[in-house]
């Protein structure tokens, strides 16, 4: 029997039908927008991966996943005028991102779109000043960085070996492109200072030492032999084939790579005299504006220069006063700080990493399993003597996005002279620093189906700020470890941490003073003298480094302070949402549940700029 609907039932049915249609339309709009955005991000990811064979090799363990023919890729070569073209390319990306409506995207895609907009906007602001960049900076430039990347180039099969040798053949073109850019910088009146050029010229000679190459003791030869031996041991290469590849490597290093480095040195020699004496960006037309743009890009902070200065000054004043009180209350501490810091039990780098890995378990969430059941491991290596003068105190080699099992940390023995500096350095680079953060983030994205593109958007302030946060927390772990051997371990390690914070904060302020306020060497001498540093050699070294590497110290320390600001914000959220939270924020900050909540939030939502993280924390 057919049932007749009442007017009320018809109204209900009509309402249900309208809601169904609306949901269907909205679902279609969401699905269509998501599909279009995901296709765009996949294309963007592929373009980034294809742009540089070295970057691809370090970023992806199996390029076949992305249908990329690694052998077809070549090193990016700069051509005359390319710098000006970057602005147009970035504007096209920005226009494309503007087409996507936040309301039409899923939560995950909406967050990625916001990250990409912020990232492209920050890069575009610096691209507006095409000749302020310095790809040959003594500490972070291509001349010093390329040999490290080559020495660590992963070789799992014959294709990897042949790709590596093909890259060696392309180095002359790559270096010639850098020479072209330096000539354009010179024409624009923005060439490096003669003293900086001299450093890079010495690097070229030192890194491609002809005597070492002749005697086959160069680190790019010895590391290559080691990799050939590993492939031979696995049965992938015969001994004859391995020797053949070694001969090709020796020939290319001697006749191709070394001459390319010589050409860079010769070009810089000829360009000397076309730049100014070493000084900050503020002394150039447009330099202040470029510095503000660079500061935002490198740190991920959208604060004004005035706000940043005040933030740094407050931190410096607080820590300086805290250290003063500590020293007044413990007369022996001053001598202890000036003496040998051999206070921790004797441990190898590997043992320190294992200790830290265990020590952080209460305060940091466990690394997700991802799709690889293998345990995460790390190999610690020491920087070659020829690289040591130009290398950072330590650095972590980021693993491929599809294989986070094997990790590598390099230590510069010149900059880790005692047990405490080694301990805190390994916390910075390992646990809970770069290694932990990188592996956690990549495995979380892997488990959650989030595009690996997020791993390629570099947010230096987040990445280095996190590592600095990890380093500062490691002083507490050191105090616990040394507690059985020192009665005043807590005060000693607090003093060491405060001393480190004061130095980094001061250098961050000097960065702004030099590059934004136009402070000269004489100005810096006066500032450092007020903090007890009067040695001319030390002062000049500090001034030169900061002048040559703008925004490097703020990337670390301002990034760290921004994370502390997020921690304060998180405590308010935690206090509001958790009825059992302690009444005091100081108590919340050391609560393991809160720390897990906060650290987990940062790891799941980063890397990112700090405005995006703050918005996500509030939502």
Image (cartoon, helix red, strand yellow):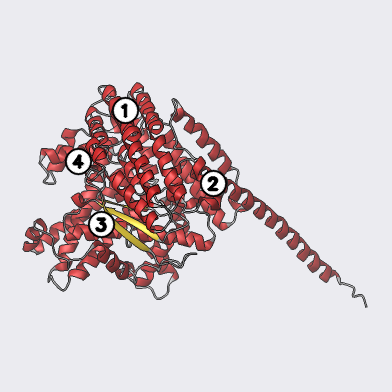
Residue at the location (45% across, 49% down)?
158
- Residue denoted by label 1: 263
State which tag comes first along the sequence, 3 or 1.
1
- Badge 3 marks a residue whose secondary structure is helix
Q: Which mark is residue 425?
A: 3
State which tag comes first along the sequence, 4 or 3.
3
Tally of numbered discs: 4
- Badge 1 marks a residue whose secondary structure is helix
Are the residues at dot 4 and dot 3 in contact (C-beta closer than 8 Å)? no
Few, some or many residues within 10 Å of mark 4 (<14, 14–19, 20+):
some
Q: Nearer the viewer, residue 82 or 152?
A: 152
Compute the Cα span from label 4 to label 3.
Answer: 20 Å
Compute the Cα span from label 2 to label 1.
Answer: 33 Å
Would you say residue 474 is visible in this rendering? yes
State which tag comes first along the sequence, 3 or 2.
2
Compute the Cα span from label 1 to label 4.
Answer: 29 Å
Would you say residue 305 is visible in this rendering? no
- Residue denoted by label 4: 542
State which tag comes first along the sequence, 1 or 4.
1
Q: Position of residue 268 (x, y in %)?
A: 29, 27
Residue furthest bottom in the image:
1
Q: Is residue 451 above or below residue 203?
A: below
Compute the Cα span from label 3 to label 2.
Answer: 37 Å
Q: Nearer the viewer, residue 534 or 417?
A: 417
Drawn side of residue 419 relative to residue 434, left or right? left
- Residue denoted by label 2: 68
State which tag comes first along the sequence, 2 or 1.
2
Q: Is residue 262 above or below residue 218?
A: above
Few, some or many residues within 10 Å of mark 1 (<14, 14–19, 20+):
some
Compute the Cα span from label 3 to label 1.
Answer: 36 Å
């Amino acid at each position: 029997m057919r049932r007749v609907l009442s007017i009320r039932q018809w109204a209900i049915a009509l309402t249900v039908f309208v809601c169904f249609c609306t949901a269907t339309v909205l679902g279609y709009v969401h699905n269509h927008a998501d599909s279009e955005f995901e296709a765009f991000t996949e294309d963007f990811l592929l373009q980034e991966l294809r742009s540089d064979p070295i970057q691809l090799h370090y970023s992806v363990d199996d390029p076949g996943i992305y249908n990329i023919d690694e052998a077809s890729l070549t090193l990016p070569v700069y051509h005359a005028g390319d710098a000006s073209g970057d602005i147009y390319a970035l504007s096209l990306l920005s226009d494309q991102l503007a087409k996507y409506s936040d309301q039409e995207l899923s939560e995950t895609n909406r967050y990625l779109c916001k990250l990409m907009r912020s990232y492209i906007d920050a890069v575009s602001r610096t691209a507006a000043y095409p000749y302020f960049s310095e790809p040959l900076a003594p500490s972070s430039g291509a001349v010093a960085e390329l040999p490290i990347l080559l020495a660590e180039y992963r070789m799992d099969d014959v294709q990897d070996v042949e790709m590596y040798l093909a890259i060696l053949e392309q180095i002359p073109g790559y270096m010639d492109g850098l020479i072209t850019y330096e000539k354009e910088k010179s024409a624009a009146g923005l060439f490096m200072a003669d003293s900086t050029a001299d450093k890079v010229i010495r690097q070229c000679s030192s890194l491609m030492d002809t005597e070492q190459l002749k005697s086959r003791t160069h680190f790019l030869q010895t590391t290559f032999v080691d990799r050939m031996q590993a492939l031979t041991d696995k049965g992938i290469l015969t001994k004859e084939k391995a020797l053949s590849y070694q001969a090709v490597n020796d020939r290319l290093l001697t006749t191709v790579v070394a001459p390319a480095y010589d050409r860079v040195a010769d070009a810089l020699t000829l360009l000397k005299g076309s730049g100014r004496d070493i000084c900050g960006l503020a002394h150039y037309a447009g330099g202040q504006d470029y510095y503000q743009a660079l500061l935002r890009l490198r740190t991920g902070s959208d604060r004004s220069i005035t706000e940043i200065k005040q933030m740094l000054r407050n931190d410096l004043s607080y820590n300086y006063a805290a250290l003063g009180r500590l020293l007044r209350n413990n007369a022996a501490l001053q001598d202890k700080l000036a003496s040998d810091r051999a206070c921790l039990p004797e441990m190898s780098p590997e043992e320190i990493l294992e200790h830290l890995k265990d020590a952080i378990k209460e305060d940091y969430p466990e690394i997700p399993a991802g799709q690889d059941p293998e345990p995460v491991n790390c190999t610690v290596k020491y920087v070659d003597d020829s690289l040591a003068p130009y290398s950072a105190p330590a650095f972590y080699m980021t693993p491929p996005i599809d294989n986070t099992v094997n990790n590598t940390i390099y230590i510069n023995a010149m900059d880790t002279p005692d047990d405490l500096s080694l301990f805190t350095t390994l916390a910075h680079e390992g646990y809970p620093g770069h290694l932990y953060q990188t592996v956690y983030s990549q495995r979380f994205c892997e488990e959650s189906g989030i595009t690996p593109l997020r791993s390629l958007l570099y947010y230096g302030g987040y990445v280095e700020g996190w590592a600095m946060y990890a380093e500062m927390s490691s002083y507490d772990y050191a105090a616990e470890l040394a507690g059985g051997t020192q009665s005043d371990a807590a005060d000693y390690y607090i003093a060491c941490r405060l001393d480190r914070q004061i130095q980094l904060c001061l250098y961050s302020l000097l960065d702004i003073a030099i590059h934004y306020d136009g402070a000269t060497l004489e100005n810096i001498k006066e500032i450092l003298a007020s903090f007890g540093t009067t040695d001319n050699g030390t002062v000049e070294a500090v001034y030169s480094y900061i002048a040559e590497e703008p925004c490097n110290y703020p990337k670390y320390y301002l990034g760290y302070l921004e994370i502390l600001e997020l921690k304060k914000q998180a405590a308010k959220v935690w206090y509001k949402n958790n009825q059992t939270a302690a009444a005091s924020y100081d108590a919340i900050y050391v609560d393991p549940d809160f720390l897990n909540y906060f650290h987990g939030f940062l790891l799941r939502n980063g890397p990112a700029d700090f405005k995006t993280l703050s918005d996500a924390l509030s939502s």
